[in-house]
Amino acid sequence: MINIGDYIAMRLTGRKSPLLDESIAASFGGYIIESENFAWEKLKKAGIETEFYPEISRSGEPFGFYKGIPTGCALGDNQASFYCIMDKPEEQININVGTGSQVVIFDERCIYNEKIDVRPFFKKGKLYVGASVNGGKTYERLASFFEETVYEFTGMKINAFEKMNIIGSQNTRSTLVINPCLYGSRGRRDEYGKIENLTPENFHPSDFIRAYVRGMAEELYQLYMDFPEEIREGRREIVASGNGIRKNRLMAEAVAERFHMQLHFIDIEEEAAAGAAKAALDRYAKLT
């Protein structure tokens, strides 16, 4: 059993057996963070053939060498992205909006909570992750609705995204409330989106756009509030990532407003790729 990243590393280095970083191991299922190992006995009782599980990297050694260059194990994209963008992880929150969305914070402690994921973070501590299935693709559906409406009435094909930013910016005080959970909610499969407080005064495209991004920000905030209180202490700013928020200034404004924190981006857009490269450099620079 092997993930695609480590398979590529095997082909590059000629290694015959996979080697697994713990940031990927946790995604295989059955991984225990405290022991830094799989729960072998429980996996066997579940009928899983554990002999197919790969070896876990223990000492941070490289996967192998490609033309004399040390090549590392594949890393979890969430951990790699976080490693790239956070310079004060004890004080910051990462909001990532791609196809879905995530709230991520770092702490050295391991405090479990049934509502969130706790992931290993390169021997430095733990990442606490609240994940939503709603994100950029949810906002994309609103754009598609406007595009479809225009086409049905006029036969014209438009790109609605930039115009939505302009229209939404013109309305900052809408009383409309939208919960845009089009794809459901983790842990509550039968809960979907809804519209509330609809009146003649707020029945306008600008209200729908502004309420929509506020609803997306509200879901992220509620995910954050599910984190243990002691883990949330001392958080002062948001570092945002992912094109779903980087290219949607209304979403960025809504998140900053709901969290009551300043929000900023770093100059690097491909955060996970850059973080993987940074982690490899930090680990293996002495071997080059």
Image (tube, rainbow, N blue to C red):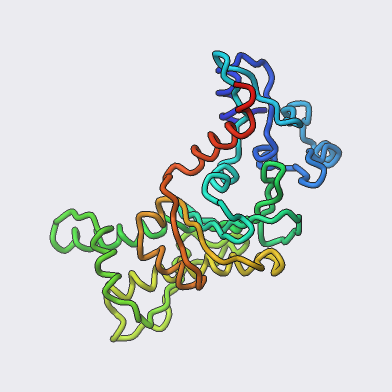
The percent position of residue 187, horizontal first and vertical second, equals 63, 61
The answer to whether residue 46 is seen in the rendering is no
**Quarter of the rendering occupied by the C terminus:** top right
Horizontal side, residue 233 vs residue 96: left or right: right
**Closer to the camera in the image, 196 or 27:** 27
> At 42% across and 73% down in the image, what residue appears?
178
Q: Is residue 259 above or below residue 186?
A: below
**Closer to the camera in the image, 21 or 114:** 21
> At 78% across and 31% down in the image, what residue appears?
50
The percent position of residue 267, horizontal first and vertical second, equals 41, 48
The percent position of residue 62, horizontal first and vertical second, equals 66, 25
Quadrant in the picture for residue 55: top right
Quadrant in the picture for residue 39: top right
Horizontal side, residue 247 vs residue 270: left or right: left
Horizontal side, residue 108 vs residue 213: left or right: right
**Quarter of the rendering occupied by the N terminus:** top right
Q: How many marks?
A: 0
The percent position of residue 172, horizontal first and vertical second, equals 33, 77
> At 56% across and 65% down in the image, what residue appears?
190
Q: Residue pushed farthest front?
A: 286
**Closer to the camera in the image, 208 or 243:** 243
> At 48% across and 44% down in the image, what residue appears?
271
Q: Is residue 235 above or below residue 36?
A: below
